[in-house]
């Protein structure tokens, strides 16, 4: 039986405001995305070859958190287009066999959402209990909870002498999922987009959805590990405002809505205190995929990635049916090519990293522009837009060396464009040796190699600064076995290896080379080897 499409797909995250501006206002939009779908997948080897697009939020929003403060779950922000332009984009994507998933932001709304406007109008309003309100004095917040963006998670509203809870900005009040009317309203929003034909959702901070009914204080944090904290101060263990068991009931409800449709999926932004908790979100009646942020946060060390991958394999074994999900860059953090930069070795590291991402067992997510080697942008203070400093990883796509990198004809793009003179699609499009050419070849190889799509994972002994593993899958000839070897060091490494033929290397000229039981890896080199039968 064939696996579900989301297990074998290569996803591509688009930040819509930064991808392509079709109308010259300096802001990327849906029509701009539609115009570049052939670049992503036109069915030929000249396109990138991705299978699905994740669109960061496109709903109406006051843009305090750039779309993650939703003011209408069933609309399109007018700067990005409208429902007809969305329908055109979706139809054109589907015509190219590209799936579309939307960003769903269920934990909180904008403070300008009509629901919250009603809720804060009086203590007796029917929507009062749609949010988390606590009556009190202005100098005594209900508890010690902290916002993930800094400061208390409570904002005092003098009009009703009450506090409301917000996990992020004060303009993003949290919904109360203990109220069945809220659950029903979110189910309706999910169904609205599924009826329109979307293929699923990336669900924002899905582990935050329930809060402790007694509003107990969080205990102080004693472990400084980044994965036990999500607020900048890192002062608390978030036992009572995140990752509550009741959240799984809410997620099951979302899944029941999805299951009324065919071939739809959810991938969750899941921050967990303990990695083993990831499995609970991937039960058969919950989300199908969950981002693995321990992998995302690894330093450039083979041991770090090896430990996370093997821990994930223990937690989500092949036989369990739960499927891993990996990414190296997104809209919230520095791009991985910039995080892992090291002088002249930077591009070699980036190529080795994408070999790892596209060959480890799991579903890979790419971030727009990484396929051409886009770095973090330089956004001066006067041009900054984001309150928490994430503009550098959201700068416009670099299509050419022309004005604004071909992103927009406007004299004032919404964010400054990066180094488009040397890094752009046009320069790399016809060069198979470029970063773009390498991504295209690697994605094609992945698609035609069943062991890389569905095979098991097995670690292979190697020098400590190398990550080496085998992907295996039964086929009509026996077992297809593919070895992946990645050298994280700046020096050559050699080790014993199975015999085989190099299918792809980050070093030019090695494809087709026979391996006779010993493998040589150049500094920062990654290879994919098909083992001899």
Image (cartoon, helix red, strand yellow):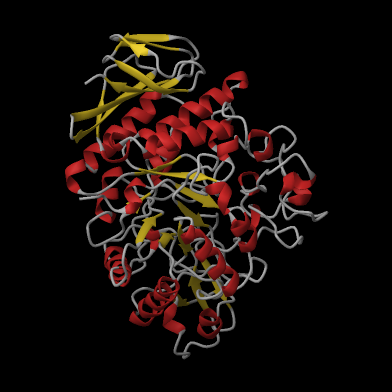
Q: Is residue 365 above or below residue 458?
A: below
Residue 446: give x, y in percent of width and height.
38, 36
Q: Which quarter of the rendered picture does the C terminus lie within?
A: top left
Specify the quadrant of the image occupied by residue 355: top left
Q: Is residue 323 left or right of residue 161?
A: left
Residue 121: give x, y in percent of width and height.
55, 86
Q: Is residue 35 left or right of residue 294?
A: right
Instruction: Tell me which residue sits at (21%, 49%) in the image.
Output: 321
Instruction: Tell me which residue sits at (63%, 52%) in the image.
Output: 19
**Label tally:** 0
Q: Is residue 188 left or right of residue 79?
A: left
Residue 381: give x, y in percent of width and height.
75, 47
Q: Is residue 117 above or below residue 236?
A: below
Residue 211: give x, y in percent of width and height.
36, 66
Instruction: Tell me which residue sits at (18%, 30%) in the image.
Output: 477
Specify the quadrant of the image occupied by residue 214: bottom left
Q: Is residue 508 left or right of residue 380?
A: left
User: Toward the viewer: 205 or 500?
Assistant: 500
Q: Is residue 482 above or below residue 324?
A: above
Specify the quadrant of the image occupied by residue 62: bottom right
Instruction: Tell me which residue sits at (50%, 59%) in the image.
Output: 93
Q: Is residue 284 visible?
A: yes
Q: Is residue 132 visible?
A: no
């Amino acid at each position: 039986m064939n696996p579900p499409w989301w297990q074998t797909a290569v996803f591509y995250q688009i930040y819509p405001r930064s991808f392509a501006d079709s109308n010259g206002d300096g802001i990327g939009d849906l029509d701009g995305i539609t115009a570049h779908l052939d670049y992503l997948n036109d069915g030929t080897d000249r396109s990138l070859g991705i299978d699905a697009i994740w669109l960061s939020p496109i709903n109406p929003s006051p843009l305090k958190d750039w779309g993650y403060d939703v003011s209408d779950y069933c609309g399109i922000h007018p700067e990005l287009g409208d429902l007809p332009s969305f329908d055109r984009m979706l139809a054109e994507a589907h015509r190219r066999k590209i799936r579309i998933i939307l960003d769903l932001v269920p934990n909180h709304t904008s403070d300008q959402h009509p629901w919250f406007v009603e809720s804060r109008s009086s203590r007796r309003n029917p929507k009062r209990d749609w949010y988390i309100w606590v009556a009190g004095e202005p100098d005594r917040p209900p508890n010690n909870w902290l916002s993930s963006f800094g400061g208390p998670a409570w904002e005092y509203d003098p009009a009703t002498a009450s506090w409301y809870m917000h996990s992020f900005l004060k303009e993003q009040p949290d919904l109360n999922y203990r109220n069945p009317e809220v659950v029903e309203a979110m189910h309706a929003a999910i169904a609205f987009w599924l009826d329109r034909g979307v293929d699923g959702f990336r669900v924002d901070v899905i582990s935050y959805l329930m809060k402790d009914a007694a509003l107990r204080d969080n205990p102080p944090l004693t472990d400084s590990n980044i994965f036990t904290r999500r607020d900048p101060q890192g002062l608390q263990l978030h036992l009572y405002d995140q990752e509550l068991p009741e959240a799984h009931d809410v997620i099951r409800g979302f899944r029941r809505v999805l299951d009324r449709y065919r071939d739809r999926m959810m991938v969750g932004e899941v921050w967990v205190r303990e990695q083993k908790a990831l499995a609970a979100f991937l039960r058969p009646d919950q989300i199908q995929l969950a981002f693995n942020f321990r992998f995302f946060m690894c330093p450039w060390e083979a041991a770090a990635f090896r430990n996370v991958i093997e821990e994930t394999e223990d937690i989500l074994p092949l036989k369990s049916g739960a499927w891993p999900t990996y990414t190296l860059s997104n809209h919230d953090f520095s791009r991985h090519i910039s995080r892992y930069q090291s002088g002249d070795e930077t591009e070699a590291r980036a190529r080795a990293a994408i070999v790892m991402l596209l060959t480890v067992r799991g579903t890979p997510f790419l971030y727009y522009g990484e396929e051409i080697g886009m770095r973090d942008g330089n956004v001066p203070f006067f041009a900054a837009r984001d309150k928490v400093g994430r503009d550098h990883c959201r700068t416009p796509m670099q299509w050419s060396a022309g004005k604004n990198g071909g992103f927009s004809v406007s004299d004032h793009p919404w964010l400054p464009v990066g180094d488009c003179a040397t890094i752009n699609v046009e320069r790399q499009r016809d060069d198979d040796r470029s970063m773009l050419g390498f991504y295209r070849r690697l994605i094609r190889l992945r698609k035609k190699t069943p062991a890389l799509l569905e095979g098991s994972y097995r670690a292979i002994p190697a020098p400590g600064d190398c990550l080496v593993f085998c992907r295996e899958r039964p086929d009509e000839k026996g077992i297809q076995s593919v070895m992946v070897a990645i050298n994280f060091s700046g020096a050559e490494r050699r080790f014993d290896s199975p015999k085989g033929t190099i299918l792809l290397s980050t070093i030019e000229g090695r494809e087709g080379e026979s391996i006779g039981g010993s493998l040589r890896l150049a500094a920062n080199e990654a290879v994919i080897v098909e083992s001899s039968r």
